[in-house]
Image (spheres, rainbow, N blue to C red):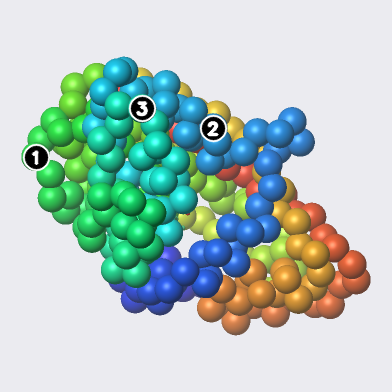
Amino acid sequence: MDDITSPEHVRDQYGTEGRLETRRSVWRPTDDGRDPADEAFKAIDRAMTGDSSVLEVGCGTGVMAERINALPGVTLVAVDLSERFVELTAARGVDARQADICYLPFEDDTFDVVYAGWMLYHVRDIDRALAQVRRVLRPGGTFVAVTNGDDTLADLRREAGGRRMVTTFSSENGEHALGRHFSDVRRQDLETRAVFADHAEAQAYLDTAGEGLVLPPFEGPRTCAGHVTVFEAR
Ligand SMILES: C[S@@+](CC[C@H](N)C(=O)[O-])C[C@H]1O[C@@H](n2cnc3c(N)ncnc32)[C@H](O)[C@@H]1O
């Protein structure tokens, strides 16, 4: 497997929006209707007390940033490493800037809430990133982070000749990492599903990672298990 924390991988994956959008499009909520992005949004909203300043790191194409920006009393800054994603997020009316979570260009104690959705697994030095988040958060501020479990799509990956995706920040190790920087860490675990209309769609999903995995043929649609955790840390 490619090292998903390498700068080359991150540049290759997020220079344009196609790969990210292909992957996002197949995910469905839990059987009881909980969507991880909605749960993260509720956590961000709950953490805001009156007028609040919010930072989103790794904002991607700006879908969540646009939702946060519409909350009453919010001042939002969204950052991402990808120039293209900063451009797409700014086009949604958001104050978007290019920055690396490991070198956040903000003063200490600037934000009431920081949100990082599905991005910390791209960071090699997770303690440096979390220390930066802690630094820019005001005392009493909240960090909301979303990530996947290592077994997400594991069956599909194995069938295609790959291995489970073990990452630097996952459902399995995220709580421990956050506990080194925050005194109160809570979690919500969600069993999501990826629904592929057919073999071609499942193969296209695997192709986005550029690992050369080849899925044996199958007929009809297919549903695969995912696992997502929404962390709230203070
Ligand atoms: C899987 S995408 C998630 C995007 C978005 N949060 C979402 O949920 O759709 C990961 C994002 O993190 C960004 N990213 C990766 N490493 C980063 C870093 N060190 N600092 C800031 N952004 C980073 C990528 O450019 C990409 O936009």
Residue extending furthest toward the left: 107
Q: Which residue is at the front of the view, 157 or 56?
A: 56
Q: Which residue is at the front of the view, 63 or 212?
A: 63
Q: CA distance from mark 3 to mark 2?
A: 18 Å
Instruction: Identify the residue position indicated by label 2 in the image.
Output: 39
Nearer to us: label 3 or label 2? 3
204 to 182, vertically: above or below: below
Residue 211's disc is none
- At x 36% / y 27%, what residue is drawn? 72
Mark found first going from the N terminus, 3 or 2? 2
Q: Quadrant of the C terminus?
A: top left
**Residue 230 % position (x, y):** 50, 35
Tag 2: Cα neighbours inside 10 Å, few (<14), some, or many (≥20)?
some
122 to 189, vertically: above or below: below
Question: In the image, ligand 1 is in what quadrant?
Answer: bottom left
Q: Amino acid at mark 2?
A: Glu
Instruction: Assign a secondary structure to mark 3.
Output: loop
Using the rendered view, name the quadrant where residue 99 is placed. Answer: bottom left
Q: Amino acid at mark 1?
A: Glu
Instruction: Assign a secondary structure to mark 1.
Output: loop
Instruction: Identify the residue position indicated by label 3 in the image.
Output: 72
**Residue 103 % position (x, y):** 16, 53
Using the rendered view, name the quadrant where residue 115 is placed. Answer: top left
Residue 107's disc is 1
**Residue 13 % position (x, y):** 44, 71
Mark found first going from the N terminus, 1 or 2? 2
Mark found first going from the N terminus, 3 or 1? 3
